[in-house]
Amino acid sequence: MAVMVAQRRRPGLVGRRKQFALLDAAVGAAQLGEPQFVVFGGEAGVGKTRLMEHLAGWLDETGWRVLRGTCVPLGTEGLPLASITSALRDLVGQLGVDRVAGLLPDAEVVLRLLPELGVRDGGPEGQGRLFEAFAALLQRLSAEHAVLVVIDDLHWADRSTRDLLGLLTRTLRAARVVVVTAYRTDDLGRSHPLRPFLAEIERLPGLHREELGRFSRAETAELVAEVLGERPSAALTDNIFRRSGGNAFFAEELARAQVARVAEGASQLPDSLRDLLLYRIERLDNPARDVVRMAAVGDPSISHGLLAATAGLGEEELLAVLRAAVDARVLITDSDQDAYRFQHALLREAVLDDMLPAERVRLHRACAEALEACPEIVPPDRHAAEVAFHWYSANQPDRALPALLRAADVAEAMYAHAEQSQMLVRALDLWRRAPEAAEASGVDRRDVWEKALAAGGWAGENIQVLHLLDRALAETDQAAEPERAAMLLAHRGRVLHLLGRDGAVTALEEAMRLVPSTRSIGRARVLDLVGAMLMLHGCPEQARAASEEATRIAGELGEKDLETNARTTLGVTLTQLGDYTGGLAALNEAAELAENRGDAVRVTRVRFNIAVALGSLGRHQAAIDVARAGLNAARTADLSRNLGALLTVQLASSLVAVGRWDDADAVSAGALDADPPGVYGAALHTIRGEIALVRGDLVAAQERHAWARTLFERVTGAPYQTLPVARLEAEIALGENRIGDARKAVADVLHVAGVPGAAPYAWPLVTAGARIEAYARMRARTVPEEPTAEGGLVEALRATVAKLPIDAPLWSAYAAQFAAELGQPGASWPEVIAAWDEIGEPYAACYARLRAAETKAETTARSGHTATDAEEWLRTAAEQATRLGAKPLLDEIELAAASAGITLATPSASPAEVSDLQRLGLTEREAEVLRLVAAGRSNRQIAQRLVISPKTASVHVSRILGKLGAASRGEAAATAHRLRLFGQDQRP
């Protein structure tokens, strides 16, 4: 069914915001009479045609005259003027031949390009007249309608087409014309005639040249989601991104044809795609094809030295065939490594699929033998891995096993956790097939298991680790080896937790039941793992007991790495229990142990936990500094997909707290490029959703929340997983006036918020719950049919707060705001302002000033504050909100000021139409959408204009209708016109 769904869907425009912004600017300039020329370059399949078609579709529906043409190959030069002829035929089809003939006195000069019209040849001097007449035709057309000319496949353009385009770029003036062309960079050899043409016109006014790159992992995921109609799993995204290399066409074809098989781990290419890829190979001669086959067994590249040792060619002949393969864009050079790799990973895959199994084995064996005979033909850091890969692929277990173990050791020394894990998993697969090699290695298979589990965990490959654990547990006799079984169960609990699956606590309890009570390294390791997981699940008392014992045993037995781990857990549990002094002391001791040993992995973990503790104390700048230092260690230790992601979340949280939202969003987006799995990716999407929400982009916040949800198979009871996602869900619902849904989002997780150690995530949640109830109370006063505050939820919130600590400045500020939101006796918004100002959180202080001013308006007689207080609060709040870019909050501030008769001199209030839109409660994006609705645009046209999906456009329109109280799009448009929300110069 998934494949059938995929075949019916065509994705919209994914990514390309920079390029579409360029086109948007070109369109705007052309509408003012300044002709524009845009040239896109990019490899085949990267999305050039789709981008131009998206532009053409948009402009066609907005009243532009759109002419399309495509250059056609014919020998070394293209078919003469093929694209111009196509564009002219398109115009005649739209207007009719008589209408086109009437536009020019000498129209027959142009119309003779269409032989079906029977216009006579204009003689030898005709080309010059033709070019001038075509330019005049565009000029005349643009007087009636703005004109878009789209010319695709410019790499096949003939000399005449290039000359005509050159003439247009130089002579077309005061015309509402945009010419957009595209060419393939992979078809442009060194002597291609398009190269000098592009160099010649590049500096002309109105000309823009841009190259389209491949998609990032995140953009590939978005494309696959568009094709499938649902968000793909991380595993499917990773598979398609790796195989397509970010090429849009390849990614789309893989998503369409292979969704079912990819989900099962299959790698077979669709026949149509394989044939297309192999066409390039078949154009090469036999010696070049042989070398390409040898290159295909490299992983993913092959060194020149290894090719020279195995190709069986002389140096000159080898260079000649390599040059042919490079010129054909089959291979590309990697000068840093003196190596070659395929232009596309799928090209290599197609070549491998086209080879006989015995042929692949023979080539791998030749490579392995050459590498062992001449180690210097590859860089030293790659030798062990390449030997292992080729012996493994040559199906030689006795030779592969020792090579894999050596390669794993090299990878471990380089913090290459994913590579180490892969080598060790393969070694485990071969262990029983190569008993003599296994015995000769002198390595205990159980040690290989432990290293594979650790490496996979650090690499963030949690699904693979879970499979390994299940295999190891199946081979372990719990009665005979209780300590080993306990260790494996503790690991399993950890992985289930990280994947967001049930069963984590059960596995940890079983591990503690099995582990012997004897003082041993094994017991200490189990206690360390169990303590860390109990800490994350909000059980600090039990976690402290386990980590204290683990710390003591490890210290007595001289196990420094284990002591560092356990001491880190101990420090965190102490802070969870309110002992920040003792907790930070333990964490700093752990940091010293890790740094003295040069252990970047453990330095990363300790720095993360120190940053969290400092953030909890409201020491945000110190937390930022520690987090940045920790990220440096994470990069060294190759932990970007797990601990590095969590460090980024903590860094971003502190940056958000101090008002540096752009920086916070940038570091979070960068961390997502590594595609962190499970809870790590979910946490990053959540923080980006929070940023989008306070900026007023509700749709982006919803999308981030949905991504966070999909990265959990099921939300578990861990506070740091559950509570931020639930709070974001509640805030989104509140932003849409779905008070019931907002309440439910909070109520559903309050049982998690009350557990010990949950304070960093619980306080923001319960404060959001109080804000929801305060908003409900306000609506009940102004809208009679609205329900009042939910008594049950209020009591549940208060009961939860009674369990939370208030022994840190940050918790005290939240507690003060919670009390003020619910109007508790003795609560004071000015005290809340002072608390947030003291900590240095401008957004929270800005919100508190707004609420203080609103409360003052209601309780002037009792407050003891003058009107000046409210005015000052609102002025300061408006300034803060403007600096932050907190659009929704600024809207509320301006509405409050207007209600109180206070004039705010803020930059955002200067345009009259903006103030009107704000008073209607419309966000900036909603204002853009309303402007297009008022101009009569459909949802599809709005989506194309704003580069969003039609579904997103529909959501925006629905919200606008609700805010305006309009029953239809026409009524909303009428309201916009009646209120004169958009001036004449602001029409689309």
Image (cartoon, rainbow, N blue to C red):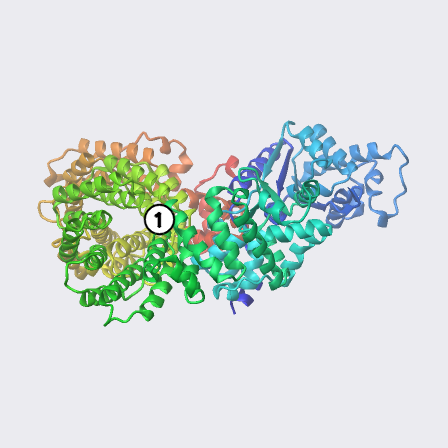
x%, y% of residue 81? 78, 41
- The one of 508 and 47 positioned closer to us in this rendering: 508
User: Is residue 474 depicted above or below 697 in this figure?
Assistant: below
User: Is residue 972 depicted above or below 80 in this figure?
Assistant: below
Residue 598 lies left or right of residue 3; in this view the side is: left
x%, y% of residue 661? 34, 38
Question: How many numbered discs sit on the rendered protein?
Answer: 1
The quarter of the rendered structure image containing the C terminus is top right
- The one of 415 and 196 positioned closer to us in this rendering: 415
**Element type where label 1 sits in the image:** helix
x%, y% of residue 587? 19, 43
- The one of 659 and 67 positioned closer to us in this rendering: 659
Q: Residue type at mark 1? A: Leu
Residue 657 lies left or right of residue 292; in this view the side is: left
User: Is residue 858 depicted above or below 745 in this figure?
Assistant: above
Q: Is residue 658 visible?
A: no
Q: Quadrant of the rendered structure where residue 65 is? A: top right
- The one of 110 and 983 positioned closer to us in this rendering: 110
Q: Quadrant of the rendered structure where residue 637 is? A: top left
x%, y% of residue 222? 48, 53
Q: Residues within 10 Å of mark 1 (few under 14, many from 20)?
A: many
Residue 346 lies left or right of residue 630; in this view the side is: right
Residue 322 lies left or right of residue 396; in this view the side is: right
Q: Is residue 459 visible?
A: yes
**Residue ID for mark 1:** 684
